[in-house]
Image (tube, rainbow, N blue to C red):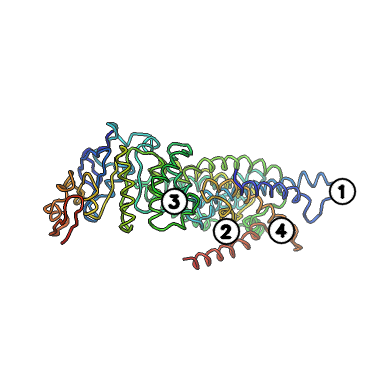
């Protein structure tokens, strides 16, 4: 099970990035604004055509796959959090079954259970708080039972408790074998919760390794241009400037 | 079948027979002379046509609102109805407006608008721009067709041609025959099937276009389904009845609260409710004690425009 960028280039956004994502792990994509994080994530999800190189899923080019087959394998959670119509949580989550063409009652129920949204099944989306809505949207992705979950800043705009509860759900997915890839702005979250960190700078791959290594003080200074220090012990780090 | 579908299907079953007896002449099959003739050759085709056109407009509106994720979208905004109207006006202008030629010209106009829309908005390099491009292209086609229609009116060779164009544009079901039904019904039915096929993709669009694509939706295919489905339903409606506005806007609005709000579960009940609205409005037009019959297109716009304003006011208050 592999999802791999091979010398991937998207003009003006991403330049020659090669990286093999890991299943059963949480990978964080970090970088300053405009570094190409979201572009890389969309391309890995098969939503952007590469201008050079390609994305390979299990050794076959993702771009050549049937969109529905691709959709079954790769779940994508956009940053926008848009829900245009005021549907119920159950119907929102069930949208994740579209690539399968079934109702997937069991998958929908277990996705809602995994995100602690079971009690909200009948609630209209407009009545949810920001944190609840984020969980419902994640449940939508889980309902499709993808082997890869690519999420664009799922933790932004959430308070600490909701960030941790969402990360717990994602960690459980990774433990079950799913490859989880997140765009993360908060370097401390990436440091403490990711198994691996990809650092992008102006479209180029700057680091792709364990968090302690990829988010070393030298790389933070090179890429973000700030002198900072990590406090605390591994898995409980805080970044101070 | 959901509750809204059932409700409107039942109402329609009641309304159709009632509409047959109502009119300037109230038909009582035992008393009225030529009752069967009036019913079969005048009232029934008119009722069937109202149902067909209303169903097409309602479904097209529901699908369009789902596609654009905007409750203010109306199929009339996207150039297809004005394109069809332009075709018909050209037929009237050059004086070839027979029972078959006028609708044919209108269908060619609708097809032209569809092709232009697909040409401009289809196959964009960046799919993220697809919907904005679609909306803008549609509105430009609508205003171009509108301008050409005005041009044809201003250049009309004689007062008779001018008045026949203007009257036709107002939309009506007066004196329509089975020939009109034969033309509009199959095309509208085909359009309804196409729109229904788009239902699941429209549901996915609820999450925005990137998420919809990640769920396997092909934006080009979806746009094609929408253009073809709207073109067939709205185009054939305009071809036989002229411009009938606002049905596509109001109906999905009224129906949406009765459904689970997924775009796919809105299409069929909107078709039924659209049929009901046009049928009832047409009967009201027939019954109003005016010297000449109130044109259906005018009547629906008279209801529609204030409704639209009310909607905007309510949205402003909610925001």
- Relative height, residue B280 to residue B315 (above, below): above
Is disc 3 placed on a helix, strand or loop?
Answer: helix
- Give the residue at mark 4: B285
Query: B253 and B98: which one is in front?
Result: B253
Q: Residues within 10 Å of mark 1 (few under 14, many from 20)?
A: few
Distance from Cα at disc 1 to Cα at disc 3: 54 Å
B314 relative position to B12: left or right: left
Which badge, 4 or 1, is on the more N-terminal residue? 1
Q: Residues within 10 Å of mark 4 (few under 14, many from 20)?
A: many
What number is the disc on residue A14?
Answer: none
Query: B105 and B252: which one is in front?
Result: B252
What number is the disc on residue B134?
Answer: 3
Which badge, 2 or 4, is on the more N-terminal residue? 2
Distance from Cα at disc 3 to Cα at disc 4: 35 Å
Which badge, 3 or 4, is on the more N-terminal residue? 3
- Give the residue at mark 1: B33
Q: Are marks 2 and 4 on the same chain?
A: yes
- Give the residue at mark 2: B155
Chain under disc 2: B
């Amino acid at each position: 099970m592999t999802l791999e960028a091979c010398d991937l280039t998207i003009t003006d956004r991403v330049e020659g990035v090669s990286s093999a994502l890991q299943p059963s792990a949480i990978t964080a994509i970090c970088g300053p604004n405009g570094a190409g994080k979201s572009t890389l994530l969309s391309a890995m999800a098969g939503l952007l055509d590469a201008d050079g190189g390609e994305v390979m899923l299990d050794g076959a080019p993702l771009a050549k796959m049937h969109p529905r087959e691709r959709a079954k394998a790769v779940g994508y959670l956009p940053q926008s959090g848009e829900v245009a119509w005021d549907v119920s949580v159950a119907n929102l989550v069930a949208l994740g079954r579209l690539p399968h063409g079934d109702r997937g009652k069991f998958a929908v129920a277990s996705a809602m259970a995994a995100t602690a949204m079971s009690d909200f099944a009948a609630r209209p989306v407009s009545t949810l708080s920001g944190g609840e809505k984020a969980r419902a949207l994640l449940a939508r992705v889980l309902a499709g039972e993808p082997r890869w979950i690519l999420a664009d800043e799922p933790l932004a705009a959430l308070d600490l408790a909701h960030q941790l509860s969402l990360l717990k759900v994602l960690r459980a997915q990774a433990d079950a074998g799913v490859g989880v890839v997140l765009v993360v702005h908060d370097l401390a979250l990436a440091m403490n919760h990711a198994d691996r960190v990809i650092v992008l700078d102006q479209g180029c791959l700057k680091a792709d390794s364990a968090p302690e290594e990829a988010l070393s003080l030298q790389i933070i200074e090179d890429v973000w241009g700030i002198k900072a220090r990590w406090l605390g012990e591994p898995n409980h780090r805080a970044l101070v400037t | 079948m959901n509750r809204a579908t059932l409700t409107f299907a039942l109402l329609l079953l009641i309304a159709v027979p009632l509409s047959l007896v109502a009119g300037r002449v109230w038909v009582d099959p035992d008393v009225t002379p030529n009752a069967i003739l009036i019913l079969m050759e005048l009232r029934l085709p008119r009722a069937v046509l109202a149902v067909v056109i209303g169903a097409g407009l309602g479904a097209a509106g529901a699908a369009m609102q789902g596609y654009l994720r905007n409750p203010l979208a109306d199929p009339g905004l996207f150039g297809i109805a004005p394109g069809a109207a332009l075709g018909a006006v050209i037929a009237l202008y050059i004086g070839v407006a027979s029972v078959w030629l006028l609708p044919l010209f209108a269908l060619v106009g609708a097809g032209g608008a569809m092709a232009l829309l697909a040409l401009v908005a289809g196959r964009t390099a960046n799919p993220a721009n697809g919907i904005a491009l679609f909306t803008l292209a549609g509105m430009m086609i609508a205003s171009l067709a509108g301008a050409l229609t005005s041009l044809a009116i201003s250049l009309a060779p004689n007062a008779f041609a001018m008045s026949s164009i203007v009257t036709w544009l107002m939309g009506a079901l007066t004196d329509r025959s089975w020939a009109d039904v034969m033309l509009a019904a199959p095309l509208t039915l085909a359009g309804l099937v196409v729109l229904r096929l788009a239902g699941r993709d429209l549901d996915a669009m609820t999450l925005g276009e990137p998420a919809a694509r990640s769920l396997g939706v092909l934006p080009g295919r979806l746009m094609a389904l929408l253009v073809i489905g709207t073109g067939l339903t709205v185009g054939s409606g305009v071809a036989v009845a002229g411009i009938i506005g606002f049905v596509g806007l109001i109906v999905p609005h009224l129906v949406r609260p009765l459904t689970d709000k997924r775009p796919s579960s809105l299409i069929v009940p909107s078709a039924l409710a659209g049929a009901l609205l046009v049928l009832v409005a047409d009967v009201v037009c027939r019954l109003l004690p005016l010297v000449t019959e109130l044109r259906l297109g005018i009547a629906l716009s008279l209801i529609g425009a204030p409704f639209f304003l009310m909607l905007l006011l309510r949205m402003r208050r909610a925001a």
